[in-house]
Image (tube, grey):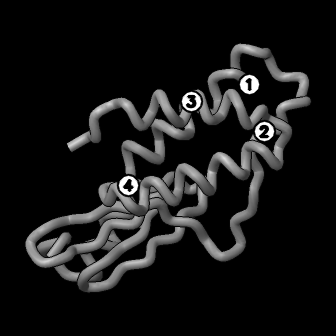
C-alpha cells in the first residue's frame, strides 16, 4: 500500500499539508491515488506515475500573443515538456502526453516547427529513472 496508516490518518495528514486558502481534491483508493496533477498507481510491486487531469480541465496554456516577456513564452513549451517527461513513468504514455501537449501549444499560437525542435531535444535526453 502507499499509506501504511488508515484512510482517516491519511486525510488528517493531508489537512495539515493543505493551506486553508487553497482547495485541493484527493482521490484515493487501495491501488491508486491522484493529487494535484499526478496520478500514482501500484502495479504489481512497482509504482507508476502519470499526469492527472480533472474532467473539467481545458487548454489554458498561456497564448503566444500575450504580452508576457518573450523569454517566458519561448521557454514555456520546453518546461512543460520536461514536466511531462519527469512525471510520466511509462514511455508510451509519455509520448502520447507530449503529442497532446504539443497540439495544445499549436492551438495557443506556438510554432509547430519550434515545438518539434523542443520535442526532439526532450526525446534525446535519457529517461528519468
* Residue mark closest to the camera, 4 vs 3: 3
Q: Earlier in the sequence, mark 4 or mark 3?
A: 4
Secondary-structure class at tag 3: helix
- Element type at mark 2: loop
- Can you identify the residue that label 2 sits on? 62
Image location (x, y in percent) of residue 55: 65, 76
Q: Using the numbered discs, state the Cα–Cα distance from disc 2 to disc 1 in whole angstroms.
A: 8 Å
Picture disc at residue 73: 1
Q: Are marks 4 and 3 in contact (CB under 8 Å)?
A: no
45 in relation to 71, above or below: below
CA distance for labels 4 and 2: 22 Å
Disc on the earlier residue, 2 or 3: 2
Residue at point 73%, 43% (across, down): 105
Q: Is residue 56 left or right of residue 128?
A: right
Is residue 36 at least partly visible in the picture? no
Q: Residue at x 28, y 34 (%)?
A: 126
- Name the side, left or right, on which 110 lies relative to 29: right
* Residue 118, disc: 3
Number of other residues with Cα within 10 Å of mark 3, as a class: few under 14, some 14 to 19, many 20 or more? some
Left or right of 62, for residue 39: left
Which residue has dot 4 on it? 88
User: In terms of sequence position, does the residue under pointer 2 or pointer 1 come before the other?
Assistant: 2
Q: Earlier in the sequence, mark 3 or mark 1?
A: 1
Disc 4 to disc 1, how far (Cα)?
Answer: 24 Å
- In percent of width and height, residue 75 lies at 63, 23
- Label 1 neighbour load within 10 Å: few <14, some 14-19, many 20+: some
Q: Residue 67, relative to residue 82: is it above or below? A: above
Amino acid at each position: 500500500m502507499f499509506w501504511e496508516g488508515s484512510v482517516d490518518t491519511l486525510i488528517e495528514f493531508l489537512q495539515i499539508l493543505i493551506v486553508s486558502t487553497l482547495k485541493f481534491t484527493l482521490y484515493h483508493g487501495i491501488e491508486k491515488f491522484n493529487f494535484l496533477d499526478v496520478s500514482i498507481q501500484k502495479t504489481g510491486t512497482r509504482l507508476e506515475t502519470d499526469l492527472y487531469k480533472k474532467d473539467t480541465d481545458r487548454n489554458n496554456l498561456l497564448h503566444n500573443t500575450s504580452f508576457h516577456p518573450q523569454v517566458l513564452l519561448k521557454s514555456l513549451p520546453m518546461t512543460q515538456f520536461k514536466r511531462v517527461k519527469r512525471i510520466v513513468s511509462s514511455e508510451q504514455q509519455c509520448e502520447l502526453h507530449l503529442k497532446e501537449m504539443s497540439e495544445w501549444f499549436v492551438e495557443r499560437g506556438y510554432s509547430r516547427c519550434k515545438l518539434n525542435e523542443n520535442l526532439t531535444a526532450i526525446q534525446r535526453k535519457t529517461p528519468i529513472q
